[in-house]
Amino acid sequence: MKRNSVAVFLAIGLAAGLVAGDRLTGRPADPAPAVLPRDWNSYAPLVKRVLPAVVCVEGQGKAAARAKFDDIDPGFGSGFLIDPSGIIVTNNHVVRDTKLVTITLHDGRKFPSQDIRRDPTADLAVIKIEVKEALPHLEFGDSDAMEVGDRVLAVGSPFGLTSSVTHGIVSGKSRNLNINVHEDFLQTDAAVNPGSSGGPLINMEGRVIGLTSAIKTRSGGFQGVGLAVSSRIAKSVAGQLVKNGSVHRPYIGVSVVEIDADAARRLKAKPGAGVVVSDVVAGSPGAKANIGVNDIITKVHGTEVRSPREMQRAILALPIGEEVDVVVLREGKLFLSKVAVEHQVETTSLKPPAAAARVDYASLGIRVTDLPADANKRSGLPKEVKGVLIAEVTANSAAARAGLARGQVILQVNKTPVATAEAFRKEIELSNQERGAVLHVLKANGDVDFVILRTR
């Protein structure tokens, strides 16, 4: 008993001595570790607000069948409600080739819908479901206000795993892959995989600042580079699809290219001093305003333009039906052109109109074959790769100019998987000649990249 008592007194005395020592030396005692509030170190409160408005989108028909066997986006993806009445936004490539979709809500309820309104040029679609009660929904945020380094969440159904949430940051802004006519991608390192397409990219306020849409990858799966259609484009397109069923965009009928070294020499201009007019549509607002090929456009409605990308953004911001100033440099002299902006109605049909000129497969200078059964072993390709093998590319052909080469594997044409040479030919011939065909290509170095294949 005495030993125990002595031990207790010694322990108390030692503790008191340590405290007294701290007081004497002026060194404060170590504070108790702070307990962080849950809202500070967890995304759970934000996720609980967002998840009820995120849905699964499943197409019925051939696209859905492809998705089942090939584990790709077309036919299955994600979306989110933007209105309590049952209005959903997703990617157009998720609902491509289907007239009927099934929407599965977060609570498990399923709703069929044939009310699908599309804008293929921006890869966006709006779906309406009939409901009797108000549904949870999300609001759009301002993608332009996001900065590189801002935190984001991606929500969707990667590989069919519904209600999946990943986190990351905004890795880049205003990315352009040339896979859509109208593009303005946010880049993120939040994990995005097949099935995520159409799901919302959320800021820390719980607002949608993008729709996850594509990935840059070597393996076919996520490798740190996800791309989302910006809310700046998505909000405008969705609003017009809901109101009009189609999208009206400002139009002046002028195509432009960068001032590269050759153009700078030829036109006696400085690179980056504007954009060179490469084509003017006859009878268009630009033609009526005396804008011609080889003119250099430096400003549009008060906005400087130094690249085709900036020109596109400036045009999309123009007021339809009004006259705007366009500053033009011609043969070293500046002049002001007054352009009356018109609107261009873009089709929402599943396929390009029958009258549109198609790509002539025979003129491309490329020959493909089915991927041999043992190609994975012989060439070290991933086991899950499905596509067609480029067997031959003619020198100086359209295929050669696009950077295609023997031994590369073409995985998709215009976002449609091609597992046979015949499927590749059919998809190529369905492509619009003016826009060309967008190929998803597995290159020799392992990169999976987008290639635009045009005949002119």
Image (tube, rainbow, N blue to C red):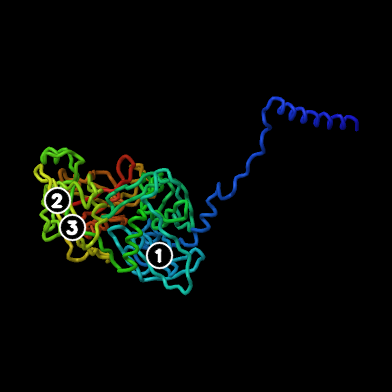
Q: Nearer the viewer, mark 1 or mark 2?
A: 2
Q: How many marks?
A: 3
The residue type indicated by label 2 comes to Leu
The foreground one among 152 and 76 is 152
Q: Are marks 1 and 3 in contact (CB under 8 Å)?
A: no
Q: Which residue is mark 2?
A: 336
Of all residues shown, which one is farthest toward the top?
25
Sort mark 2 into few (<14), some (14-19) or many (20+) by Cα contacts within 10 Å. few
Residue at left offset 47%, top offset 48%: 167
Q: Position of residue 436 (x, y in %)?
A: 21, 54
Q: Is residue 55 left or right of residue 9?
A: left
Q: Is residue 440 left or right of residue 329?
A: right
Q: Position of residue 390 (x, y in %)?
A: 25, 47
Q: Is residue 208 left or right of residue 311?
A: right
The residue type indicated by label 3 comes to Ile
Q: Quadrant of the N terminus?
A: top right
The residue type indicated by label 1 comes to Ile
The foreground one among 454 and 234 is 234
Circle number at residue 98: none
Q: Which residue is mark 3?
A: 252
Q: Which residue is mark 1?
A: 88
The reply to whether residue 383 is visible in this rendering is no
The image shows residue 298, relative to residue 419, as above or below, that is above
Of all residues shown, which one is farthest toward the bottom?
132
State how far apart marks 1 and 2 are (Cα): 44 Å
* Chain-order first, disc 1 or disc 3: 1
* Chain-order first, disc 1 or disc 2: 1
The image shows residue 444, relative to residue 280, as above or below, that is above
